[in-house]
Amino acid sequence: MKQTPRRTWLPWLDVDVPGYCTSPAETAAFELEAGCASLGIRVPRLSLDASMGDGYEIIQTNEGTTIAGGETGILYGTYAWMEAQAVGEPAPAGIQRPFYPLRMLDCWDNADGSVERGYAGRSLWFEGGRLTWDGARVRQLGRMLASVGINALCINNVNVHGAADNLIEDEGLPSLSRFARALQPFGVRLMVSVNFAQPMRHGIDTADPLDPRVRDWWRLRAEAVWRAVPDLAGFLVKADSEHRPGPFTYGRSHAEGANMLARAIAPHGGALVWRAFVYNCGQDWRDARTDRPMAAYDTYAPLDGQFDDNVILQVKYGPFDFQVREPVSPALLGLRRTRLALELQLAQEYTGQQIDLYAMNPMWRELAEDLPPERVCAVAAVSNLGRDDNYTGHPFAAVNLYGYGKYAWNPRIDPETVIRRWARLTYRLPKPQEDALTDMLMGSREVYEKYTAPLGLCWMVEPGTHYGPNPMGYEFSPWGTYHRADRHAVGIDRTSSGTGFTLQFPPELRDRWESPESCPDRLLLFFHRLPYDYRMRDGRTLIQRIYDDHFEGAEEVAAMAEQLAGLALPEPDRTEAGERMALQLKNAREWRDVVNTFFHRLSGIDDEQGRIIFP
Ligand code: GCW
C-alpha cells in the first residue's frame, strides 16, 4: 500500500503540486487555492512585479490580502502568508527580501544512489548510475525548499566519482535538463559538482588550468551544459582536497584553477563555487609543527583579491571540519577581497547522525557573534535529506532544513523563534508540550557537546563512521587531528607561542583566545594545552569539568527521553523519535564512560563526587 506522503512542516498542504505547474507564479496560485481550502480561509490575490525578484510584500486591506512579489518572491510570499495563517500569527509586514541572494543546499549524493555522510536513506534522484526520480516526491521536496527560500540545489557529491562524471557530458545533459525543469516551478536552480580533471577523460593528457586545450575544453563544455540547462546556478568544485585532483598537481594556484573555470562559465551567468577545504590529509603525527586548522587561511590568504568576480570561495564555518565546537574559520574573516560563502552542514556527520538530537540554529546564531553576516555573500549547507519517508531520518532533523532556510533568509533571526515555529507547524501540540519540544531542541546541541567533546577538544570520534567515542582513534592517523593527551595535560597550544594559529585572527579574537584566562571555557582545549589540575574560572579543575560535563550530558539525555515520551506526537513520528532516543541514550552513556575512563586512566585523578568511572 502506498503510504500517505509525509508533509514535514507543511501538513496543511495535503494536495500535491501537480506536474503541470511550470513556474513559481503558477505554483503560488495552485498552493494558495489548495492551502486556503485546507485551512478554510479566503484566497489572497497575487500580483507579480518582476522587478522584486526574490522579494515580496503582503498587503492587507479591507478588500482582502494581496501578495505582491517577483517571479520567485511571489511564491516565497505565498508560503510566508500561509505559514502565518497556519500558526495564527501576523504575516511579515513590509517588503521582505532575503539577506543572501544565493542560498544553496549541497547534496553529497552519488550517482550509484548512495549518499556520502547521508543519514536519511538513499538519494532522492540518483540510482544505478543515472538521474532518476519520483516526480511526486521531487515536487514535495521542491515545495519544502521553496517554503523556506532555498534557491539552489547542488545535486551531486563534491567527491565526483563513478557515473557522476557523466552529468555534464552529452549523454548526461538530457536528464540534467529534465531534472532542472522539475524544480523550476519552485524557484530552485540546479548546480553540479564537477571533477577538475574532467578534460582528461577526453584524451587531453593534463588538467593544467593554464593549458589552452584544457581551457578550450571547459569553455565548450560550459556552452553545452548551459545550452541544456540555461538556468544552471553554477559549478561546485572540490580540488586538491582529500585526494581530489586540482591545480596543485601542475604547480598552479587555486586562483589560477578557479579563474580558468570561472571564465568558461562567465558568459552564461553561473557562479563558480570553489571549496576552501584544503589541508594535508597525509600528515605524519610526529610532525607537531603542521597544524591542520591553519591550512585554509595559509592557502587562501595569499590569493585574496586574485579571484574573478564570479568565483565564490566556499569556506566551512570552522577551521577543522563541522565539529560540535570550533572557533570561526579565520579564512572567513581574513579574506576581505574575495567573495565568500559560508558552508554549514545539516547532515549530522559529527553531530549525532540524525539519531541524536541536534538543532543547529543556536549554533549558527553564536557564529554570527564572531562572523558578521555581511562578511559572506552566500550560504551553503550540506543536505540532510534522503529517500526515507520523512526525508531526514529523524523526523525532528527537519528542523535543521527548515531552520537553515530561515537563517539564509535572515541570519540574525532568533533561533528560538525558528525552532518553535517549526514545532508548531509540524505538530500543533498543546502549549506546554510545544514548550517542552522547543526547549529540548534549543538545548540539544549543548547536551550533545557535554557528553562528547570536552571543552572544544575535537575528533574523539570513531574514525571512518564518525559516530560514537574513540578518544585515540585519530591520534596517530594522517588526518592532522590530534589532542596529544598524556598523563599531565591535554590539548594543543595554538597560541602565538604554540602553533601560531591565533595569529590568523583579527586582534580582538586573537586577544580573547590567546590566554586561557580570557578564552571562553567552551574553546579552552581548542586553543590551549593545559594540565588536568588547571583551575578554571569557576574554581573547578579541568579534569573535574570534563567529568562533570560527561555525567551531566548523559543525565540530560535521560531527562530528554522522559520529556519526549510525554509528547503527543502523531505516528509514525512518535515511534521513530522514540527509537532514536533510545539509541541516543545508549550513545551518550557510551561517550560518558569511554571519555571519563580515558582521562581517569591517564590522569589518575578521581571524580570529586565519587561517581562511577569504570577502571
Ligand atoms: O568531513 C569530511 C567528510 C567527507 C567529505 C569531506 C568534505 C565529501 O568526512 O566525507 O567529503 O568532509 O567536506 O569534502
Image (cartoon, rainbow, N blue to C red):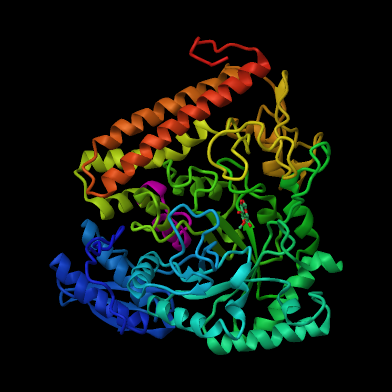
Name above or below for residue 375 compared with residue 94: above
Which one is in front, 285 or 407?
285
Left or right of residue 496: residue 196: left
Q: Where is residue 248 in the image (x, y as percent from the top left)?
A: 81, 64
Q: How many marks?
A: 0
Q: Which of 264 and 86 is in front in this view?
A: 264
Q: Which residue is drawn at 31% across and 39% down?
A: 578
Res. 297 in view: yes
Specify the quadrant of the image occupied by residue 37.
Answer: bottom left
**In which image quadrant can residue 585 be found?**
top left
Q: Is residue 154 above or below residue 347?
A: below
Judge whether 125 appears above or below 449 on screen.
Answer: below
Which quarter of the image is occupied by the N terminus? bottom left
The one of 394 and 235 positioned closer to us in this rendering = 394
Coordinates of residue 40 in the picture (x, y in percent): 13, 67
Please check the rendered image and state whether residue 404 is part of the magenta-colored stretch, yes or no.
yes
Residue in the picture at 45% in, 70% down: 125
Is most of the magenta stretch helix, strand or loop?
helix
Span colored in magenta: 402-417
Name the residue rendered at 67%, 18% in the picture. Answer: 602
Q: In which quarter of the image is ligand 1?
A: bottom right
The quarter in which the C terminus is drawn is top right
Work out whether residue 534 can be spotted. Answer: no
Q: Where is residue 283 in the image (x, y as percent from the top left)?
A: 79, 45
**Left or right: residue 257 compared with residue 48:** right
Question: Please, which residue is most extreme toward the left here?
Answer: 40
- On screen, residue 581 above or below 417: above
